[in-house]
Amino acid sequence: DKAKFYLKEAGLDSLSIQLSAADAAFTGAVDAAVLFSEKAAAAGITLEVVREPNDGYWDNVWLKKPFCAVYWGGRPTEDWMFSMTYATGVPWNDTFWSNARFDELLLAARSELDEDKRREMYHEMQSICANDGGTIIPMFASYVMGMSDKIGHEDRVAGNWTLDGFRALERWWFV
């Protein structure tokens, strides 16, 4: 109902767009796009899923097609993630979004030593992204790490990417 309201507010009764997807983006990306399309239809949005070839997806689709499936793994800091994906003009800003207040907060948060103030800045930045940004996040990855007393590892396990942030070979050993 909310989507229909906003379509009507924009002077539209319906909307037709294409969503490019390939399992190269992430396993199940095409299926996820189809599910997303089915949900969008209820709001009067025709979402045509364009199944792109896996080979060349990152060179020929990502950052070239206006709406496509993408997978982002987490980063160790908020600054790293925001700077890489949402700052105005950065190469991997895949929605080509720009917001002056967001950019201002991003720069200020880098030099803010008070953790509570910096946390508030990042919260405001997340709100700006949610309310003004161009990213749709239909799901989050769930990383499951198997542990055994026969395997040694450092005290912490990375929450970004699989296999301990792709560093299991460096950080894990047989006991």
Image (cartoon, rainbow, N blue to C red):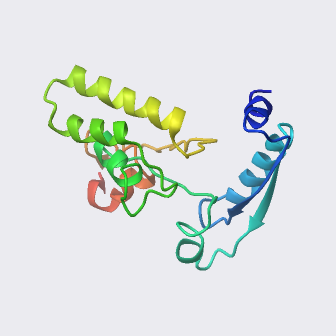
In the image, farthest residue toward the front: 11
Residue 147 placement, left or right of 107: right
Residue at 56% x, 41% y is 140
Q: Is residue 106 above or below residue 28?
A: above
Residue 61 placement, left or right of 148: right
| Place of residue 122 in the rendered image (x, y in percent of width and height, measured from the top left) | 33, 31
| Place of residue 97 in the rendered image (x, y in percent of width and height, measured from the top left) | 47, 50
Quadrant housing residue 23: bottom right
Report the front residue among 154 and 91.
Answer: 91
Quadrant housing residue 84: bottom left
Q: Quadrant of the N terminus?
A: top right
Residue at 43% x, 52% y is 161
In the image, farthest residue toward the top: 116
Residue at 23% x, 20% y is 116
Quadrant housing residue 105: top left
Residue at 55% x, 46% y is 134
| Place of residue 157 in the rendered image (x, y in percent of width and height, measured from the top left) | 34, 43
| Place of residue 68 in the rendered image (x, y in percent of width and height, measured from the top left) | 63, 60
Q: Is residue 88 above or below residue 66?
A: above
| Residue 85 seen in the figure | yes
Residue 161 placement, left or right of 76: right
Q: Is residue 53 above or below residue 128?
A: below
| Residue 156 seen in the figure | no
